[in-house]
Image: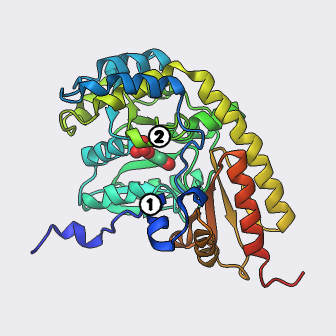
């Protein structure tokens, strides 16, 4: 069968390995497996959410509220915008796809950092657009600007703040200065999947969705319930933008794209901010232990504003081998070899999981090394 030409340049997204796969392929006992590969909240979600979802289980025969009225209202209130400025997606991933399909085509191009969220490129390639990347792995706005000014065809710019999979985050002020230089017909997708973490430790990183869309009508701000809120399995994310942009994106949305239970979970999750803030506090306490650990063993890490940390190795160590050895012990991390880096990304787990990771990692890392 002949398929659309654009599919020739597309790879299937490889997600973090699920626990079931490690049980099947590596024969590790399920209770010995810890998954530190997909930046999920290791403490789960608020208990209030679990109760509310269980109570709603009886309504599965009915289609969900297609307008997502209650969740949009709750998000609008949280961010001080109008509910017409909000769109809900099956994960913010789906809204990335809407944004890309609304603007990108075979005649224009899309600009992103060299090492950033893989789905930007995958969705962009579906449209036949040209992908442009900055030379540096981490976000460097002068590089973005230089490329932007050198061509006329850039339709979309992606900024991941903080950036997955590296963890770095630009300051708000430099982002604003950059946006001042960008034409209002260029869509800028500001991905705030880890904003809850970034703003907790550094107010200079905080992006206020209301402020950014008021100043820059070409910005689409994205947030998700999958990370800090602990609802990755529920697939719920949101976009905030000018009403005119939301209306364009809504044309790409299939009806009933969010399940009844996901809507309920997200609405209730927003009511338990204490839970989220406690998780974030613990996350950064644990992050310090990872930083100490890296210094002690003598490898590099990237300062992280998220719930994961990227560990970089010198040539004598290989991230693919390290990840594979960890997997045999039942510890799932993300190898960044596919990004051309000798590094792994590790989600910050519970204190207990982190102790276990560090023990196993130390053994693997020091194995064969002269000490
Ligand atoms: C996890 C993540 C998302 C989206 O996750 P969803 O589960 O689809 O909401 C978006 N952007 C980045 C950078 C992420 O890490």
Q: Is mark 2 within 8 Å of ligand 1?
A: yes
Residue 183 appears in view:
no
Q: Which mark is residue 357?
A: none
Question: In the shown orientation, is residue 269 left or right of residue 309?
Answer: left
Element type where label 1 sits in the image: helix
Element type where label 2 sits in the image: loop
Q: Earlier in the sequence, mark 2 or mark 1?
A: 1
Q: Which mark is residue 226?
A: 2
Label 2, label 1: how far apart the Cα atoms are? 20 Å
**Residue farthest to the right, as pictured:** 371
Front one among 24 and 195: 24
Q: Position of residue 193 (x, y in %)?
A: 50, 41
Q: Quadrant of the N terminus?
A: bottom left
Residue tagged 1:
20
**What residue is shown at x 58% (from left), y 74% (from top)?**
324
**What residue is shown at x 41% (from left), y 64% (from top)?**
14
**What residue is shown at x 72% (from left), y 67% (from top)?**
361
**What residue is shown at x 65% (from left), y 49% (from top)?**
348
Question: In the shown orientation, is residue 60 left or right of residue 308?
Answer: left
Residues at circles 2 and 1 in contact by the CB criterion of under 8 Å: no
């Amino acid at each position: 069968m002949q398929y659309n030409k654009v599919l020739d340049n597309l790879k299937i997204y490889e997600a973090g390995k699920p626990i079931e796969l490690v049980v099947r392929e590596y024969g590790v006992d399920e209770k010995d497996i810890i998954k530190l590969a997909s930046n999920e909240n290791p403490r789960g979600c608020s208990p209030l959410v679990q109760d509310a979802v269980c109570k709603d289980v009886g309504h599965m025969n009915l289609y969900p509220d297609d307008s997502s009225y209650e969740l949009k209202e709750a998000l609008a209130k949280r961010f001080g915008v109008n509910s017409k400025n909000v769109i809900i997606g099956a994960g913010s991933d789906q809204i990335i796809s809407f944004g890309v399909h609304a603007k990108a085509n075979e005649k224009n191009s899309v600009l992103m950092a060299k090492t950033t969220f893989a789905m930007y490129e995958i969705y962009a390639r579906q449209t036949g657009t040209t992908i442009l990347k900055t030379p540096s792995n981490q976000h460097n706005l002068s590089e973005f600007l230089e490329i932007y000014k050198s061509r006329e065809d850039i339709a979309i710019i992606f900024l991941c703040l903080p950036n997955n999979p590296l963890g770095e985050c630009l300051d708000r002020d430099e982002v604003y200065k950059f946006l001042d230089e960008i034409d209002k017909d260029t869509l800028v997708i500001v991905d705030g999947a880890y904003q809850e973490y970034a703003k907790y430790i550094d107010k200079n990183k905080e992006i206020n969705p209301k402020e950014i869309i008021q100043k820059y009508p070409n910005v689409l701000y994205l947030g998700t319930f999958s990370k800090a809120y602990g609802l990755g399995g529920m697939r719920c994310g949101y976009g905030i933008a000018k009403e005119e942009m939301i209306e364009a994106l809504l044309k790409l949305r299939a009806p009933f794209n969010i399940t009844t239970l996901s809507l309920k979970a997200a609405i209730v999750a927003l009511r338990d901010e204490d839970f989220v803030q406690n998780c974030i506090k613990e996350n950064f306490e644990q992050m310090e232990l990872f930083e100490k650990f890296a210094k002690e063993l003598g490898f590099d890490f990237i300062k992280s504003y998220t719930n994961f940390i990227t560990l970089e190795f010198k040539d004598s160590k290989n991230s693919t081998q390290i990840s594979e050895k960890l997997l045999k012990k039942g510890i799932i991390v993300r190898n960044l070899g596919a990004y051309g880096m000798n590094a792994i990304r590790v989600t910050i787990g519970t204190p207990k999981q982190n102790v276990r990771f560090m023990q196993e990692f130390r053994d693997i890392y020091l194995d064969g090394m002269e000490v």
